[in-house]
Image (tube, helix red, strand yellow):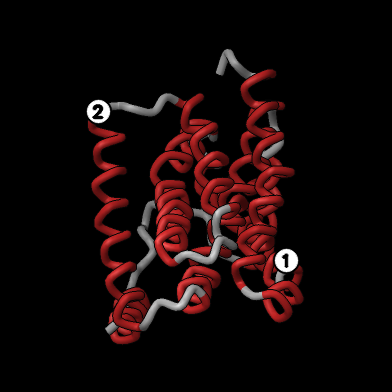
Amino acid sequence: MVGLATIAAGIVTFFAIEPKIDSEKFTLINYIKQTKIGFAQLWKTPYIRDFSLYYISIGGITWYYLYFLYNVFMTDAGFSPAVRGWLGGINSILVGIIAFSLIRFKMLTRVSTYVYFPIILCIGFFIAPLSYQWISAISIFLIYLAGITRYIFLDQYANQEFDSKYRATAISALSMAISLVYFLLSFIMNPILSRYGSQWVMFALGIITMVTAVPTVVILLKNHSNK
């Protein structure tokens, strides 16, 4: 069904027509130029630079988990295909409820949001090697929660920081940087995955979170409290 939906979306997109009001033509040169401008936007002020590093750290780690390690870890934890299906469905429902509640009741400020992601990730990653399925289920849920809510909370902050003229390009640059982190993690974690299993890849990601996301949170809170 996912494949059919993707094919249908591709067919529909193929017939899309650029609005007549757009005067700038799409060329490879313009694309490279816009990409350079987008990356320049990520460093235009000290605050945006530190926020971008934080965003890339959280985004890269959770992207790697969601699109690769999520199912691998569930399998290695001993969950059957049926149980993995139930876990996936339950996690999605719970994340939806929690995210709606956090937004509806305004339970997270910007400061608490910055702190929320490293804490959730560190707990989820560091408990992963413990050999109990119920602990594995908690680990899976916590990191899934951080991975999905990253789009909800951090993306809105990113949108607020960039001028409308360059916003789309800057967001694309952030996405490219996250993809690069995903690419690097795929190679760096492969020896650990092959030799020790996904549980210790999770633990290693916890250490990476500690040395990347945590320092950027400290910098954001210490140097940019006025923001």
Q: In which quarter of the image is residue 189?
A: bottom right
Q: What residue type is labelled 1?
A: Leu
Q: Name the residue under label 2.
A: 105
Q: Which amino acid does label 2 sit on?
A: Phe
Residue 188: x percent and y percent? 76, 68
Q: Nearer the viewer, residue 181 or 140?
A: 140
Kindly indicate whether the residue at mark 1 contacts the one at mark 2 (C-beta within 8 angstroms). no
Residue 169: x percent and y percent? 56, 49
Q: Quadrant of residue 63?
A: bottom right
Image position of 82 with respect to 70: above or below? below
- Helix, strand, or loop for circle 2? loop
Residue 174: x percent and y percent? 60, 50
Residue 13: x percent and y percent? 35, 74
Q: How crowded is mark 2: few (under 14 residues within 10 Å), some or many (20 or more)?
A: few
Determine the residue located farthest toward the front in the rendered image. Answer: 132
Q: Tell me which label, 2 or 1, sits earlier in the chain.
A: 2
Q: Mark 1 points at which residue?
A: 184
Q: How crowded is mark 1: few (under 14 residues within 10 Å), some or many (20 or more)?
A: few
Q: Which residue is drawn at 33% across and 27% down?
A: 107
Is 108 placed left or right of 26 in the picture? left
The quadrant of the rendering that contains the N terminus is bottom left
Image position of 194 with respect to 150: above or below? below
